[in-house]
Structures are given as C-alpha cells and as structure tokens.
Amino acid sequence: MFRRILDSAWFYFALAGALVLLAALTQFEVRIPTREKAPISELAKLRERDDINVVFLLIDTLRSDRLGAYGYERPTSPLIDEIASHGIVFDRVVAQSSWTKTSMASLWTGTHPVKNGVLRYNHVLPEEAVVPAELFREAGFRTVGLWRNGWVEPNFGFAQGFEVYVRPTPGAERARIHRQSQSTSPLTGTDEDMVMSAVDFLHQFRDERFFLYMHFMDIHQYVYDDYSAIFGTSYSDAYDQSIHWTDRLLGVLFESLREEDLLKKTIVVIASDHGEAFLEHGSEGHARNLYREVAYVPWVMSLPFLVDGGVRVPDTVSNADIWPTLLDIVGLPPLPGADGVSLLPLMLETGGETPSEPTAPLLRPVYAQLQKGWGRPKAEPQFLVSVTDGDRRYIARFGGADDEELFDHGSDPSEQRNLIEEDGADPADLRELAAAYMESGGEPPWGTQAGEVELDEMRLNHLRALGYVIKP
Ligand SMILES: [Zn+2]
C-alpha cells in the first residue's frame, strides 16, 4: 500500500493540488496553529509517548544571519521567526563543512568529517554507517525522504533506512518563477513540487508514526516567484528573496500539519548544511572556505507544545549534535561513536529547568573541515579546519601552506580582523586542538572507510549544473 505513493497517482494528486497551493501561497499569513502551552520540562517526557513524529527540514545553503529570528533586519522569514518565538532556537550553530555531501554525512552520522571520511565528490557513505532513518525504521516509523540535491542521491549512500527516497517529479510550473542560475541546464522544478508531495504524504499517513526528511534546494538555486521579488536585483537580494519564497512554502507545509492535526504530536526541525558567501572574504557561493558566512547555520525547532516566549540557547553547538539530540528526545538508540552529543539537558537548563545531569561537558570546541579541491581527486589533499571555542574562531590549513587565522566573534562577528596578523595573538591552544582533530580520524565507528563511486558524464553534469567545479 505504501508503495502507492511512488506511483504516478501520487503526483497527479500533487498536480491537482497545485491550485490549492497557489491560493495558500499568496494568501498565507503567519498563523501558527493551536497546540497546548507547556513548560520546557515537557521536552524530557516526549520519549515516553508513542505518537511523536519527526519532520526534518534541511534547507540547503541557508546562512543563519539572513533570518529574522537571528537578527536580520529584512523580513525574509516571518514563519520561521514565528516558530522560533514559541519553539527552540540555537543561536550559534556551526556546520561541519561548507558543501553538501561532507556536511550531510556528518549531520546524519553525528561524526566529524575527519572520522567518517566523506570528503570528496565521489565518496560514498558506506552501508555499515548507522543513520537516523534506519533507527526510525527499526522502531516502526514510516520513513520518507524527499530531496532535490544530487549530492544526497542514493548512490552516495544517503537512502539508507528510507522506505521511500525520491526526487519529486517536477509538476506544471506556475508562471513567473525567477531563476538566478546562469547554468545552461538548471535544476528542473522547484521546492513546491516537494511540498506538494509532502502535503499528500501527511494526508495519507497522518495516522501512522513517521519520520519525514525534506531537502529544500530553491535557496541554493536562488529561485523565487513574483510575490517574493521584494528586496532588489543583486545576487544578495535574490538570495533573500529565495529565503522569503521558501519561508512561504514552509507555511504551506505547516498549514497542512495543522489541518491534519499533527502539530501536537510532531517535532519539526529546521536546519541547513552550510551558508553562502557574498564576497565577505573575496569569494561567492560556498564550498571554498570555512568563514562564518558559509559555516553558521540555523537550528530551529517547533515542538508538540508551545513554549511561552521560546527558548534560545546562546552557546556554540554543532550540526553533529542535532541527531544525538533528536534521538534522545524521541527515545531512540543513540548513533554509535558519534562526536556530537545530546543537548537535551542544555535545552532544559537554558529554559530554566534544573538539569538532572551536568551540562558543562556539553559545551566544547566545535569543528568544521573542508578538503580543498574536493572536486579534483588527483590534486594533493589540503585541509581547512576551523575550531570555534566560545568567541574565538581559529581557521588553519593543513598540507601545503601553513596559513592560520584567528577571529574574535565578540568584537568582530564578520571575521574581518585576523588577530594573528594584526595583534600578534598566539592561538597555541586552538592550534593544538586543530592538530588533535586532524589526528582523530582513523577508523569510523562502523569500521568501513568511505567508499568511492564511479560517476558517469550525465551525473557529473547534473552536479556541475548546481554550480560546482568537478574535474575527475
Ligand atoms: Zn548544500
């Protein structure tokens, strides 16, 4: 019966719903539906319930400082801001890399890139790796993944645990979709296709427990419609417009969760794999360095109850903490050998509860890593590693040049003053941490090193169409 949604009927359903969606998109106002109010201590009791669902919204290429909830002055994200106002927000979240595949391998396994080894364009997360969808499925959840980014295709190992893992078929595109992409073969369809599929899924499976993962791509592609064309004409404006458009699509999804009466038993997580640069450090896009504009991402959660005023966690945490935390909340087994930790105690303490266990060890330095030239495997590997410890952020290069930089987020949040050059600062402790991080690789917890896959020209061209340079 479940296979039915793979059939075309599902997508015809979606097409038939397009008019309804159009109405919702143009008339949607922020209107977060009814759930009971409860103290944050309720969060520790969710694992005792047998009706909790998880919706994981990975919004590709979303830097946190472009959202109202993170202090942006433009109204790019009214819905996310509303969710934040009675949910949970982590103020400082570092993604473990600045391009999708490395970042997602880390996010799903809770391990650092140096340990899981998924660092290059042709690397594969092995079957032996344990990912959340497998744990959900073993626990009897329906598991569905909807995605539009070629870096999370099944051939890279990302379909593990999903009963259904599909790139939704592009529906009839509504007029006046703007695409900033200069690619000759831009990604077809929009995230609207994915939302339509999700709306139909929620309607059909509302009475079963589910884990739904959606990987949004319109911000990556700078896609938006006329209604969101409100900020201007530069690349940066277009990026903001695509956030506005995506926020409206999230509104449609939340409206559906409300209509199906699912909000009171669903945790909705908004996260991202990396940010986007607009020449802050001389480059545009992402996947080139680890500066804050590509490394700092949102982590916002809507809970099955409303928290008065919301909870904001000010500490620096990592994307690798997301799944250890969520699995702890819903009471599923932990990810084996994860570098990330459950931040449930920290959330409770920040929300005013007395923690049952000490939270201090949860606040640790946070790491990110990028293999330079990840699209050119014949090049000698050079690694960028960042260590974030409180307000201090250290970025170093390993292999080749020994460049290093140190920034103080307290006085210089946009990372413009390298204190090693300008003040003669000596980041000896952070240098040591970065070196220890590089040494901590070795064997992944599941024993098998990342594999490699041969990519044909068609697949390579699809990935190049996203804007990446790949030269096998
Ligand atoms: Zn990405």
Image (cartoon, rainbow, N blue to C red):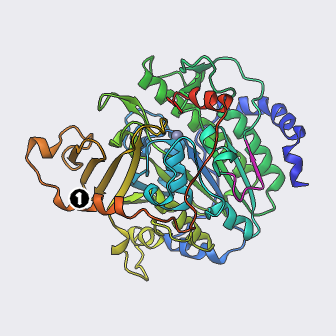
Q: Nearer the viewer, residue 159 or 371?
A: 371
Q: Is residue 232 above or below residue 327?
A: above
Label 1, secondary structure: give it. helix
- Residue 464 appears in which quarter of the rendering? top right
Residue 329 within the magenta-colored segment of the rendering:
no
Q: Which residue is at a point 83% across and 36% down the rendered structure image? A: 11
Q: Is residue 167 above or below residue 369?
A: above
Residue 126, image x, y percentages = 62, 57
Q: Range of the magenta residues?
A: 159-166
Indicate yes or no: mark 1 CB to ligand 1 under 8 Å.
no
Residue 439, image x, y percentages = 35, 62
Direction bottom: furthest residue? 356
The residue wearing badge 1 is: 430
Q: Quadrant of the C terminus?
A: top right
Residue 104, image x, y percentages = 54, 50
Would residue 242 be found to the left or right of residue 434 on screen? Answer: right
What crowding class fits label 1: few (fewer than 14 Cα within 10 Å), some (14-19), or many (20 or more)? many
Judged by its main secondary structure, the magenta piece is loop
Residue 265, image x, y percentages = 68, 63
Residue 165 within the magenta-colored segment of the rendering:
yes
**Could one spot residue 225 in this view of the protein?**
yes
Q: Nearer the viewer, residue 58 or 464?
A: 464
Q: Which residue is at a point 35% across and 28% down the rendered structure image? A: 283
Q: Quadrant of the N terminus?
A: bottom right
Would residue 295 be found to the left or right of residue 455 on screen? Answer: left
